[in-house]
Every structure is written in C-alpha cells, then in structure tokens.
Amino acid sequence: MHSHNFHTHLRHVAVAAHSPAQSLSDNSAQGLISEMVYSEDNPSVTQFILLPLLQQLGQQSRWQLWLTPQQKLSREWLLAAGLPLAKVMQTSQLDPLCTVDAMVKALQTGNYSVVIGWLPEELTDEEHMRLTIAAETGNAMGFIMRPTSNMTSGSRPRNGLKIHSSLYH
C-alpha cells in the first residue's frame, strides 16, 4: 500500500452509540459505507484515521478485504502497520466497473469486518444504496477510496460526520 497516502473528505460516517472499541471488537457495530477522497501527497488519513480503525477491526475474527486497483500490499507494510497478515485478503487489478459489485457481494457475506475498494468516480445513489444494504446485512464497514483529481466542484457529502458525544466525556 506504499502508493496510496490519503488526505480525506469523510462521507457517510456513522459512529455507533456505544464505545467504538466495544463496537469494533465484538461485531456489534452496524454496517456502514464511508467514502474518502484522498491525495497521494498527504499520508495523514492512513496514519491518523484509517490505519487505527483497520488495526481495531483486525482484532475481530473476520477478514479484511482490499479491492485495490493496481497496487499490491506488501507483507512488510502490513507488518509495520500492525495489520493481521492472516486476516488480510487482497484482489488487485480489479476493473473499476466490477468493484462495486464485488464490494456488495463481499459485504453481505458477513465474512469481512471491512471491505476497501478504490473507485475513480463518485458513487451513484443506486450504488450507494446497494453498498449500504450489503454492509448492514453483513454487519461490515465498507470504504470507498477516491482520488482528489476526480472530484468535481459540485461533489459534496450526502451526510455530515456523526460523532456520539460520549466520545468526548
């Protein structure tokens, strides 16, 4: 994953009403889909947001699925990032047209705590709905990663970031 550093614009993030550690480790988190718009020039999201979340999800008995465009995750990077080698699966060189369908199928199985897919374009409302239903069915998290170069000026989040107040008290 050396080739992707992330600068983010979080979309559709819902945080469970109980503690995040509990929800991530005991499979009680409800499914959700989040879109992140990233810049390869800024590693802040991987270091401060996405990586800690993936590390916590790695404590579950379920797998993590990475549907990457052309990058190959290296064993060294996974170890250095603290991600469980035995629970990370990757499919590379997947056609972007197939990524949403692959994510839907993977999310709804319940076999994955998280499914991460890279898409060149913004999701349609129909694609977002399909992914949301699949994530809820499989009680999983789905992350859509999209480069900033494909952002249109009219792009905006469907919802704002929702954080439960108990995280601050």
Image (spheres, grey):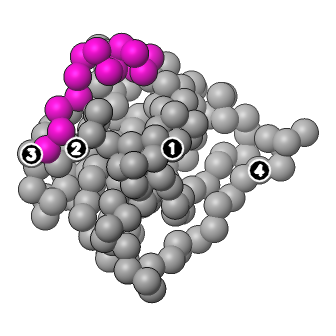
Q: Among all residues in the image, which is located at the extreme right?
A: 169
- How far apart marks 1 and 4 lie (CA) works out to 20 Å
77 is within the stretch colored magenta = yes
Q: Which residues are magenta?
A: 70-83
Residue at (37, 73) in percent of width and height: 151
- How far apart marks 1 and 3 lie (CA) works out to 23 Å
Q: Is residue 36 left or right of residue 20?
A: left
Q: Mark 1 highlights which residue?
A: 45
Q: Among all residues in the image, which is located at the extreme bottom?
A: 154
Mark closer to the chain start, 2 or 3 = 2
Q: Amino acid at mark 4?
A: His
Q: Are marks 4 and 3 in contact (CB under 8 Å)?
A: no
Which numbered mark, 2 or 4, is in the foreground of this view? 2
Q: Position of residue 3 (x, y in %)?
A: 27, 40
Mark closer to the chain start, 1 or 4 = 1
Q: Amino acid at mark 1?
A: Val
